[in-house]
Amino acid sequence: MRPFTLERPHDIATAVAFGAADDDQTDYIAGGTDMMQLLTDDIRRPGRLVSLGDGVLDDRIEAAPDGALRLGAAARMSDVADHPAVREGFPLIAEALLSSASAQVRNMATVGGNLLQRTRCAYFRDPGVHGCNKRAPGTGCAARDGVNRMLAVLGGSEHCIATHASDFAVPLVALDAVVRLSGPGGERTIPVEELHRLPGDSPHVETVLVPGELITAIEVPASRAARTSHYLKVRDRESFEFALVSAAVALDTDGGRIREARVAMGGVGPKPWRMRGVERALAGAACDPAVLRAAAARAADGTAPRPGNAFKPELMRRTVLRALRVVGGQP
Amino acid sequence: MTSTAAASVVGQPVSRVDGPLKVAGGATYAAEFDPGPGLCHGAIVTSTVASGRIASIDTAAAEAAPGVVAVLTHRNAPVLPYHEHKGLTDPPEGERIHLLQDDRVRHQGQPVALAVAETLEEAVYAASLVRVSYRPESAVTAFSDAVAHAVPPGPRYRDRGLEGDGGRGDADAALGAAPVRIEAEYVMPRLNHNPIEPHGTVARWSEGELTLWDKTQWVDNVRAEMAAVFGLPPDRVRVVSPFVGGAFGSGLRPWANVTLAAMASRHVDRPVKVVLTRRQMFGITGYRPRSTHRVALGADRDGQLLAIRHEGVSETSTYETYAEEQLGSSEYLYACRDVATRYRVAPRNVQTPNDMRGPGKVTGVHALECAMDELAAALDMDPVELRLRNDTIVDQSTGVPFSSRSLRECYQAAGERFGWSRRNPRPGAMRDERGRLVGYGCASATWPAMRQAAEARARLLPDGSAVVSSSSSDMGPGTYTSMTQVAAETLGLPLERVRFELGDTRMPTAPVHGGSWTMASLGSAVQAACAEARRRALAEIGRADADLAAVLRQIGEPVEATVRTEPGDELRRYSAHSFGAVFAEVAVDPDLCTVRVPRLVGAYGVGRVVNPKTARSQITGGMVMGMGMALTERTEVDPRDARPVNSSLADYLVPVNADVGELDAVFVDEEDPHVNPLGVKGLGEIGTVGVAAAICNAVYHATGRRVRELPVTVERVLGAAVR
Ligand SMILES: Cc1cc2nc3c(=O)[nH]c(=O)nc-3n(C[C@H](O)[C@H](O)[C@H](O)COP(=O)(O)OP(=O)(O)OC[C@H]3O[C@@H](n4cnc5c(N)ncnc54)[C@H](O)[C@@H]3O)c2cc1C
Ligand code: SF4
């Protein structure tokens, strides 16, 4: 860990000003569950660390009368997972949170920080590895021809195939959730699906946030489909492990017909991946085994695996099918 | 036993005597010792190439950083004598790395500099400022390339009885003639011990004497090694290690933290603490080596084994040869006339492996027991029945009888508890209430019963209490407790009046705490020392039947006896091994191919059980380790540059509580009159042996698919399914 100055502002404007002043010197820290690792592993080397902990961001969890959710960026993962409005109205969000990390981490971690956690690519996290374009632009990508079992099969580039490891973000993308941002240029709202960028030739730029811009809240629109939903995470151990692949599925059915389907996957791309092909195959169709199977078969469309993760496309189809069957009551 | 007073405490499920101290935070671990004023901290800089020379090393920025006391590299580090020293746990072939003595880099993660500063944070920061560039040299980085140049272990291993080639009869001919044959290859990845406490040392010199507080399973060897490295008489080095936060073999050799702490402490003339980071635990300490095994079995149609051919190769470093006894069990576990074994080591540019719980056996038995299951399938025979049909009371590799062997009883006891009779022999035929495929599998376990010379001191005090000591270790098995039991029983004193001390080179010499031989070796010495001390005390007042506590009060001063015990020739007259049978139930998701283990049941014949409570937890802990080996654990070594990739506990997956289902371990009644005075055969390691095989065999039974490479991951089950 390198020496840095810790700033503890009490309001958003001050916090934003620190980050806007210079772009590479400032990092923010919320719950610290990821940032502390990045600092101790010498991956992030900020000159200034700005804490978002002293009331800069709110941690309220609110449900509107129509069911829409608003989560203050500082809300803890554990609190959101426990909230009745989330548990009843958005089972897939509660399940995604409860299958994340460990109870101890969830008690500390904020939902804002969760969306901005860095990739788990092991080469990224070991500063003794030379080739990582994300950590050190222009040095190459050790993972492409290396150990890449956990990495992306969608949306990667020759410069980076890292996955975004958040579980929570997957249902958010499925449900068209948005993030509220506050930055040097004022406030704006963008879909969670547009928060992260694909790596292209600049994998070190991971989001569309400008320097100093903060997530202040996450808003999930009211959704009938979300009431019958499921988050299915396939992983190597029963707990405390990131997804090999995961699926967030929500179905709004009416008399055996699927009115609306929401499907997104995690563990497969640099950001949560919305499965629009699967959704199209479901929308308006009967909720029967053949339809679910045909729709799930499209889950791996467009994948480009590496030898180390060549199993993912097949696992993606199976995972989506299982999640659809659970939600569609077709075990 | 000379016990007169209270009922026998040996054999009782006594709770750990050090438990309250550990739970309350009162146990002091190596890095927590306070060596007095002036302590500074060392942070290690490690290499990022597998082989080469240090071309340049720039320490200017590090030296100028706040709080820095010194930055040591090969350019300014003291030149150390590094006399030859090879303890029992050091590889007999090759030579250890001489730290910071030259510009050579032989593996990724090798220490190339040490930053010493007032605080840990300052040391770590300074270490990050050291700039090193390398002149890389050609290196063998991929295991497959190393295997192509594999060699026999070497002459010094041959002297220790590890030849490389072994067996009896003509296995090839017997295989050719066998009516039923199977042959298969099994791959086992590198595994790291990953104890929760990282290796760490506090070093202090005063008046030419070196004191080290270290995490180790063998203080005496740390002393011998440091004496050799620094050219000191051993009595000028003291090593203290009362508590060890897990080791599983990682504490068998002193690692770089010990030498660097001692070197730096002398250099800066202050106490220095060096603790490895978790990442450094993957690059500096040893590990269970990666290996590939090929097994061919031949049998007649009734399941009588006619031939065993077992070949194995495992990784080692280029500067030392680490070889382990991987194939011995294939020569003695079953009756079989024609057996051939062939073991090779494959040097590559990595650090040297070292013993990890159940070294050799865990690897070799896994391959053999998976192959036995394949043979049972080929014979259409119950896998338990196949093992029992080949049971033997004579060790056919040496021709001498086993001192005791309860393999059959173990299969019976564990099979009954497990409910093996409910197994539908057809693969894929059983399901649980959630629709998952259920499989039952079994495997044999074995571990040699060994014994070393050991010395213990019993000091009886006028207040009727006793302090018994020896330089041993207790990295978790319960040595404090079991030795207290043996001492209390022998002395005839209540348990609470006896204190056992260990982990200090000033104490009488214990053997290395490993090999599952501590109870046999040190237990015998403790028993003898206590008996002798008791005899002396009673002799002083001339009455053999008096109450010891009363006698001690009467004598009014301490009575002491130090006794050294040694094994006799019993291990030449008998083949002594613990045996066991382990059963696994798995549940496999038919679509997602995830494997879970709801149940493991094992029964073991280990001679006398001194403490069934700690013994059971020793076995169940071993089972969890075997489960990790089966399903989640592996150190991925990048074949391009030999760097461990997943060198963190977020990426190296040890089982978590949620993975562990029901664990059941029992001991069959077994009396072994031959093996040692206590009649104990050792149970520290056998719990890990066979577990992965039982799980793999259960996966086959659940799915009809063989996964022959560990760990059994989703894609391996899936790949077998899609294929
Ligand atoms: C051992 C372990 C296992 C884990 N397993 C999982 C898992 O299975 N699934 C999963 O989804 N996650 C997992 N995580 C990740 C965990 O969920 C994240 O670390 C956590 O959510 C981050 O939240 P935080 O508040 O601690 O963020 P911090 O660590 O404080 O910050 C993370 C990042 O977000 C930035 N940041 C934080 N808040 C804001 C904000 N409001 N505006 C702008 N930038 C901000 C920080 O600058 C930093 O870059 C795991 C983490 C650990 C340590
Ligand atoms: S995949 Fe991305 S993060 Fe991983 S090594 Fe390549 S560039 Fe770095």
Image (cartoon, helix red, strand yellow):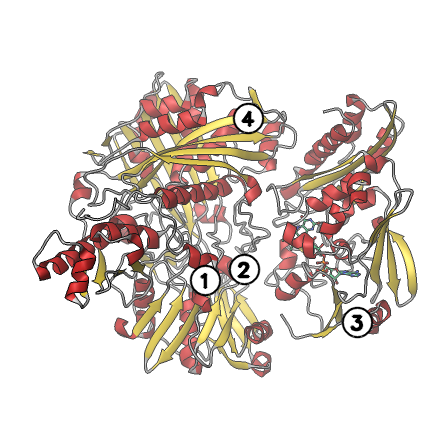
Answer left or right for A203 relative to A121.
right
- Pick the residue in front: A292 or B454: B454
- A138 displayed left or right of B46: right
What residue type is disc 3 on? Answer: Pro
CB contact under 8 Å: marks 3 and 2: no
| Residue sticking out furthest to the left | B542
How far across and how far down the image is residue A221, in percent? 89, 45
Q: Hey, what amino acid is under mark 2? A: Arg
Using the image, tell me which numbered label, if any, was put on residue A9.
3
Q: Are marks 3 and 2 on the same chain?
A: no
Q: Secondary structure at mark 2?
A: helix
Q: Is residue A297 visible?
A: no
Distance CA(mark 2)–CA(mark 4)? 37 Å
Marks 1/2: CA–CA distance? 12 Å
Q: Are marks 3 and 1 in contact (CB under 8 Å)?
A: no
- Mark 2 Cβ inside 8 Å of ligand 1: no
How busy is the neighbourhood of tag 4: few (under 14 within 10 Å), some, or many (20 plus)?
many
Distance from the alpha carbon under mark 3 to that under mark 1:
39 Å
Quadrant in which the C terminus of chain A appears:
top right
One can see residue A55 in this view = yes
Ranked by sequence position, the earlier of labels 4 and 1 is 1
Q: Position of residue A304 (x, y in %)?
A: 73, 41
Q: For marks 3 and 4, give the one nearer the viewer.
A: 3
Q: How far apart, in angstroms, are the residues tagged by discs 3 and 4?
A: 57 Å
Q: Return the residue at label 1.
A: B199
Pointer 3 chain: A
Q: Are marks 4 and 1 in contact (CB under 8 Å)?
A: no
The residue labelled by disc 2 is B279
Q: Amino acid at mark 4?
A: Val
Task: Tell me what residue is drawn at x 86 percent, y 70 percent.
Answer: A13
Q: Which mark is residue B438?
A: 4
Quarter assignment of residue B526: bottom left
